[in-house]
Structures are given as C-alpha cells and as structure tokens.
Image (tube, rainbow, N blue to C red):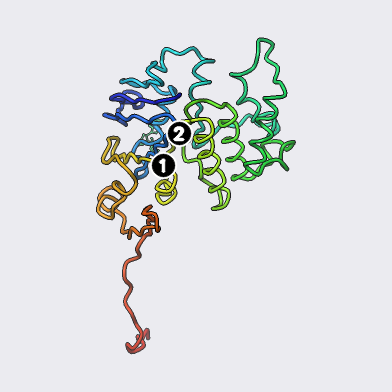
Amino acid sequence: MSRLEIRDLAAGYRRRPVVSGVSSTVDTGGWLSIIGPNGAGKSTLLKAVAGLLCHTGDVLVDGRRTASLRRRERARTLAYAPQIPQLPLGLTVTDYVLLGRTPHLGPLGREGRSDLDVVDELLARLDLSHLAGRSLHTLSGGERQRTVLARALAQRAGVLLLDEPTTGLDIGHAQSLLDLVDDLRTELGTTVITTLHDLTLAAQYADELLLLSNGTPAAHGTPAEVLTPETLNTHYAARTTVLHTPNGTPVITPTRLDRPDFSGNPTPDFH
Ligand SMILES: Nc1ncnc2c1ncn2[C@@H]1O[C@H](COP(=O)(O)OP(=O)(O)OP(=O)(O)O)[C@@H](O)[C@H]1O
C-alpha cells in the first residue's frame, strides 16, 4: 500500500517561494501527472515531495510523514529520478542500476541473486541489456535517460517520482518506459507522480493531472477536465486543438496560425 498525500505544500529557493498551496492525494497504484509551462515549479514540487528540498506542509505515505522516516526506509518508500541527473562516470550500466537496490541489501551490503534478477529484468524491459557492461560516459542521451530511470525503478519503492522521464526518448522508447511504469502500478501497486511536458502522453497514462501555473495549482482533475483549449491558451499561451481518441482520451495538437494563401494571387513583384 502506498497512498500519497500532499498537504498544503510550499517550497522554494533561498527564501524565494516558488510553489505554494499544493494539496493532492494519490491512491495506491494511482498516477498523477504534474503539468504546466516552463518555470511553473513542477520540478521544484517533485523535489519537495521527494524530501530533497526544504518545504512547509506535509507529505505522507500511508499516513506517515515521510520527513520522519529514516534514510533506508525513506528510500524504500520513495524513489526519485531527476530531470538532469549527475552521473558517477566510470560505473557500468549494471553497476549503476544496482545502486537502486541499496535500500534492500542485507547487513553485509552484498547484492544477491534476486537483486541481479530485478536489474536484469529492468535492463531488458528498457532495451538496455546490450549496454549492461558499458561505461555510463559512453551512452547516448536517451540511453543515459533510460539508465537513470532503470535505477529508480530498481529501488522498487512504493512511490515513484519521475521528473520528465520521457525527455530525450524517441516515441517507441518513451512508450515502453511509460508502459513499464504502468505495469508496475498494476503488478505491485506502485503509486506514480511524473512531471510531463507531452500532454498527450500525460493524458494517456495519468489518472489525474495537476496543472501548475506560477507555482500554484490552476487546475486539477481528469485529463479530459484539465486539457481544454481554453486552459491551454490561458496557462501556456498556446493555440491548440483538442481531439479525442475513441475511448475519450484527449489528444493535444498545436495549431499553426493561418498563413496567407497565395494561390490564385498574382506573383508578388520583389524587384
Ligand atoms: N536551484 C535553484 N535556485 C534558484 N531558483 C531555482 C532553482 N531551481 C529552479 N529555480 C527557479 O524556480 C522556478 C521553478 O523552476 P522549476 O524547475 O521547478 O520549473 P519547471 O516547471 O520544472 O520548469 P521546466 O518546465 O522549464 O522544467 C524557476 O523560476 C526557476 O528559475
């Protein structure tokens, strides 16, 4: 069970408030996606929920304040993958992903067969098996991104916090990753919070969206409730058309301004 509750959370940097007034509950196995324009405070909110940033308000998992958890217990409760990770160069992909198993290791700190099995399975699911022995600094951007996510998933925490997990991934790898996260919530009851810029993907995978605008919640609800052309225009200054798949999921398409139609007009004289 991993029911996540955020109560009146506020956070910022050097006394400059960036995010405030955020309250939300994500049930066990639920998926909340935080959306909003650049600089709205999405990463700041996720870092605060992960306990990596000073904040006011509370974050509770199954009724327990995460701030009161010991480090190891916290790592079993919350796994966080940052948008821009600092990688310890020199490690291989396998060794790096194995670091995600640290909170589960016994007193001698040695990984066992079950830890290696978890890692092998994740490498296979994220199309990384052929890179298992490669040094991190030789990976492409998308390979590195998938490796960082594999480490977070290896933690097998009850709550997964993923900051822009599809950044730099092609459409197929992005889909495999989100499918894998979706499977974890079905199989293990993992509770998921992601930030996502791709609103169509956010609508396809998340149960609920929280739209942040200037650091405060501007809309909160199902994808169909939040993703309207009016809301996107107000908060993103974007021109969009919202289509729907046969099952009613919104598909967001940017709409280009009309261009003058020169067909039939006399050729302009540039001389
Ligand atoms: N370490 C920091 N120190 C000071 N200000 C910061 C720091 N990190 C972020 N900020 C500021 O906080 C605000 C929110 O940033 P944040 O990264 O949370 O936004 P975001 O919604 O995730 O943006 P993006 O979509 O561009 O990734 C921005 O104005 C940003 O400049």
Q: Amino acid at mark 1?
A: Ala
Q: Is residue 82 above or below residue 267?
A: above
Estimate the x, y position of residue 22 in percent, counting from the top left: 29, 30
* Residue 215 in which image quadrant: top left
Pointer 1 with pointer 2, Cβ within 8 A:
yes
Q: Is residue 140 above or below residue 186?
A: below
Estimate the x, y position of residue 170 in percent, counting from the top left: 56, 52
* Earlier sequence position, callout 1 versus callout 2: 2
Screen quadrant of the N terminus: top left
Residue 193: numbered disc: none
Residue 192: numbered disc: 2
Residue labelled with disc 1:
206
Horizontal side of residue 234 vs 80, given as left or right: left
Kindly report the distance in space between the C-alpha atoms of the residues bearing marks 1 and 2: 9 Å
Find ligand 1 in the image and state its quadrant: top left
Q: Amino acid at mark 2?
A: Val
* Number of other residues with Cα within 10 Å of mark 1, as a class: few under 14, some 14 to 19, many 20 or more: many
